[in-house]
Amino acid sequence: CCKRLGKLFAETDLVGDWLGAEIYNVQVTETTHHFLILKEIAEVSRENGYPMLVEGNLSSSLIAYLLGITNVNPLKAHYYCENEECSEIYETINDNAFGIDAEDKLCPKCKRKMTKDGYSLKFIAWGPLREPKVPDFSIEIAPEIRPFIEDRLNQRFALVKSDEDVLTCALFEAK
């Protein structure tokens, strides 16, 4: 997460604070394995051309965004340029709460079109730090992709058991 964060955001104080709060929640709730497994599922789905729908508070998680589990970036509306590792974060961009609705802008360094991002969510996925909660989520996966996901999870985590549904039990067995 920190590696991708540095590529996307040159000014990382606010972003780093948000990520730090989420990492704290992941550590306290001992749910690192959830994210590692979901990252693999998302990668396999994308590699094979299948969409994956994530619902629940995980869908607004910065960690889930940085790992590629979800496309929802909860941070403030912003532009970034991966070529030059520069970014500009705003409360709103031209009265747009969502960065994706902003006007096009060129990178001041390389003059290429910057990426518009950010949904300006006002909350951290699991609520206040004083009361960390286990991530609440559900995922929808096309049935055709399940064998590929089972193979990947078995390779990475040795989780497949012939008499159990790996996608149901994997998140609980990974600990």
Image (tube, rainbow, N blue to C red):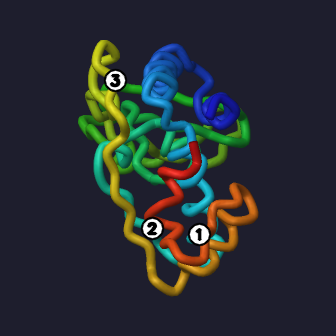
Q: Which residue is mark 2?
A: 52
Circle 1 sits in a helix, a strand or a loop, which is it? helix
Which mark is in front, 3 or 1?
Answer: 3
Left or right, 149 with reference to 135: right
Is disc 3 in contact with disc 1, using a CB cutoff of under 8 Å? no
What amino acid is found at the position of numbered circle 1 in the picture? Arg
The mark that comes first in sequence, 3 or 1, is: 1
Instruction: Give the CA separation, mark 3 to mark 1.
Output: 31 Å
- How far across and how far down the image is residue 51, in percent? 47, 72
The mark that comes first in sequence, 3 or 2, is: 2
Extreme residue in the bottom direction: 144
- Quadrant housing the N terminus: top right
Q: Which residue is mark 1?
A: 46
Which mark is in front, 3 or 2?
Answer: 3
> What label sits on residue 132 in the rendered view?
3
- How far across and how far down the image is residue 105, in percent? 50, 43
- Using the image, determine if residue 127 lies above or below residue 73: above
Instruction: Give the CA separation, mark 2 to mark 1.
Output: 8 Å
Circle 2 sits in a helix, a strand or a loop, which is it? strand
- Residue ID at (48%, 50%): 172
Dividing the picture into quadrants, the one containing residue 135 is top left
Q: Please indicate, yes or no, whether residue 49 appears anywhere in the rendered image.
A: no
What amino acid is found at the position of numbered circle 3 in the picture? Pro
- Residue ID at (48%, 72%): 165
- How far across and how far down the image is residue 116, in percent? 46, 45
User: Which residue is nearer to you in this view: 79 or 164?
Assistant: 164
What amino acid is found at the position of numbered circle 2 in the picture? Met
